[in-house]
Image (cartoon, rainbow, N blue to C red):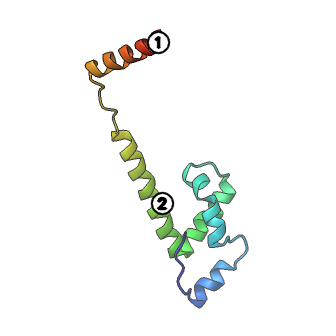
């Protein structure tokens, strides 16, 4: 969610220009924007919005950092090795259960 502050009169005027999107519209397209899935004309409109809107630039930066941190955490996660005696005990228990 984008944290909004009072915009100056110039910012308000710029955000009402033709082909300008709202902050909410930007928020709806952020994933496609980051994954480079938007056509050039929509990308141009979003880039224009980002030049005018500090909140959306900050939001985009925070979103990128969050994605990088998540990918980093998932990449480092390794499953622990299962001890051989535990595997044998589980197999023995399941075999004993079938024989009952």
Q: Is residue 52 above or below residue 39?
A: below
Residue 92 disc label:
none
The residue where tag 2 is placed is 63
Percent position (x, y) of residue 67?
Answer: 45, 53
Q: What residue is at 60 percent from the left and 64 percent from the top?
A: 27
Percent position (x, y) of residue 81?
Answer: 29, 27
Viewer-closest of 35 and 43: 35
Residue 100 disc label:
1
Q: What residue is at 56 percent from the left and 86 percent from the top?
A: 7
Question: In the current view of this chain or complex, which residue is farthest to the front?
Answer: 100
Q: What residue is at 64 percent from the left and 70 percent from the top?
A: 24
Question: In the current view of this chain or complex, which residue is farthest to the bottom?
Answer: 9
Alpha carbon of mark 2 to alpha carbon of mark 1: how far?
56 Å
Query: The N terminus lies in which quarter of the figure?
Result: bottom right
Q: Judging from the image, what secondary structure is the residue with disc 1 in?
A: loop
Q: Quadrant of residue 2?
A: bottom right
- Label 1 crowd bin: few (<14), some (14–19), many (20+), radius 10 Å: few
- Residues at marks 2 and 1 touching, judged by CB atoms closer than 8 Å: no
**Between disc 2 and disc 1, whose residue precedes?**
2
Q: What residue is at 58 percent from the left and 49 percent from the top?
A: 36
Q: Is residue 35 above or below residue 10?
A: above
Direction from residue 44 to residue 90 in the image, left or right: left
Q: Is residue 59 above or below residue 66?
A: below
Question: In the current view of this chain or complex, which residue is farthest to the top?
Answer: 99
Direction from residue 33 to residue 54 in the image, left or right: left
Percent position (x, y) of residue 23?
Answer: 62, 72
């Amino acid at each position: 969610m984008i944290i909004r502050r009072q915009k100056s009169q110039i910012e308000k005027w710029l955000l009402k220009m033709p082909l300008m999107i709202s902050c909410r519209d930007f928020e709806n397209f952020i994933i496609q924007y980051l994954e480079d899935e938007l056509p050039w004309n929509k990308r141009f409109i979003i880039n224009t919005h980002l030049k005018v809107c500090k909140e959306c630039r900050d939001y985009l930066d925070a979103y990128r950092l969050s994605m990088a941190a998540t990918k980093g955490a998932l990449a480092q996660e390794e499953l622990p090795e299962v001890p051989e005696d535990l595997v044998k005990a589980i197999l023995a228990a399941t075999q004993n259960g079938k024989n009952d």
